[in-house]
Image (cartoon, helix red, strand yellow):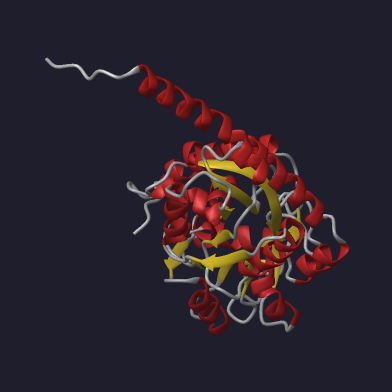
């Protein structure tokens, strides 16, 4: 076997190059950002996630003195966006608005293409999105409260139906958890997307569903839908007269839809900390809070470590729900 030989000058050059790489890593983090940043949104334009992401992106651009380009990569419960970001360079120039539905995908798809725990560096929780269970009062005129719904579901033994945006969707799993804790059964009618599901709920083809407050609030105010219970630990100010599911008689029930900034795993800690600090400053701005609340979302916050712990807890929680219900995405 023939071994390569190097002159003293070549050895010195290799050594200096290696030292330059090591020394340059923190320098690169200190110089960040030096060029535009991509903020990947895993949902289509126009929804609350897209709107909130653009608010944050605009403020980040102003504070960091670099453009922040919001890019929508919708599809497959957020897996398309997550796969893209997971494979991106960990240099602080690609970020994503991670959402609860994207967290669910690895529990539902055999080849989701990413590992939430290993492929992302949590930055900060950005906002919470309140969820509510609503019924069509025309087809269920005697259901005015959540206890009414549960009693009717138990009496009819699986004859009632609910809809969602698809098998394994957040609306599907949220109802599965309620069925388990409430001790009743109900038929699931899955749609391909939230818009047709709401349309048929309003038309009376289906009877009830879980959906986010911004989507259904206009219909609740118009009397076309009746809100029975909020899924969080506290009431949203948008529908403060509607009790939480726990308050309405299902203790232990708590579901939140949250959204937060993440970067690819391996992003320098200095960059993550700087992003976190800027995100918290932005979320504390009165105009940002006002714009968020107008969209029906509630500003959050916290450290990267707190966000990481929250992600771990949520992964364990939803893994159990999926397993217990035997849910498989199609």
Q: Pinpoint residue 248: horizontal percent, then vertical percent.
A: 74, 54
- Comparing 219 with 289, the one in front is 289
**Residue 65 in view of the camera:** yes
User: Split into 4 quadrants, where in the image is the N terminus?
Assistant: top left
The C terminus appears in which quarter of the rendering?
A: bottom left
The answer to whether residue 314 is seen in the rendering is no
- Horizontal side of 164 relative to 231 (left or right) equals left
What count of labels does the image hold? 0
Q: Height in image: 98 above or below 48?
A: above
Question: Which x, y percent locates residue 325?
Answer: 44, 47
Viewer-side residue, 268 vs 49: 268
The quarter of the picture where residue 221 lies is bottom right
Q: Tell me if residue 182 comes above or below residue 309 in the rendering.
A: below
Residue at (83% x, 67% y) in the render: 290
Across and down, in percent, residue 23 comes to 57, 30
Task: Identify the residue at image location x=64%, y=73%.
Answer: 215
Q: Is residue 218 above or below residue 127?
A: below
Q: In this view, does 150 lie to the left or right of 318?
A: right
């Amino acid at each position: 076997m023939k071994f390569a030989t190097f002159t003293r000058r070549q050895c010195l050059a290799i050594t200096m190059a290696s030292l330059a790489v090591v020394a340059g890593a923190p320098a690169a983090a200190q110089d960040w950002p030096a060029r535009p940043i991509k903020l990947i949104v895993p949902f289509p334009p126009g929804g609350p996630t897209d709107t909130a992401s653009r608010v944050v992106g605009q403020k980040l651009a102003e504070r960091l003195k670099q453009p922040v380009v919001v890019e929508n990569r919708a599809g497959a419960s957020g897996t398309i966006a997550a796969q893209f970001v997971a494979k991106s360079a960990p240099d602080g120039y690609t970020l994503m608005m991670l959402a609860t539905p994207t967290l669910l995908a690895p529990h539902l798809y055999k080849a989701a293409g990413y590992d939430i725990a290993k492929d992302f560096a949590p930055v900060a929780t950005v906002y919470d999105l309140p969820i509510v269970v609503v019924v069509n009062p025309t087809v269920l005129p005697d259901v005015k409260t959540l206890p009414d719904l549960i009693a009717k579901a138990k009496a009819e033994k699986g004859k009632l139906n609910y809809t969602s945006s698809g098998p394994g969707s957040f609306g599907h799993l949220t109802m599965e958890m309620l069925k388990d804790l409430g001790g009743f059964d109900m038929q699931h009618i899955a749609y391909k997307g939230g818009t047709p599901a709401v349309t048929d709920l309003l038309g009376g083809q289906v009877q009830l569903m879980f959906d986010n407050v911004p989507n259904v609030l206009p219909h609740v105010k118009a009397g076309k839908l009746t809100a029975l219970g909020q899924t969080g630990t506290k009431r949203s100010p948008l529908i403060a007269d509607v009790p939480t599911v726990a308050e309405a008689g299902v203790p232990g029930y708590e579901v939140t839809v949250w959204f937060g900034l993440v970067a690819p795993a391996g992003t320098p800690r200095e960059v993550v900390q700087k992003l976190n600090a800027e995100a918290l400053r932005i979320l504390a701005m009165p105009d940002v809070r006002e714009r968020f609340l107008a969209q029906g979302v509630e500003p959050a916050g916290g450290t990267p470590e707190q966000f990481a712990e929250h992600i771990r807890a949520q992964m364990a929680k939803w893994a159990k729900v999926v397993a217990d219900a035997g849910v498989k995405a199609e």
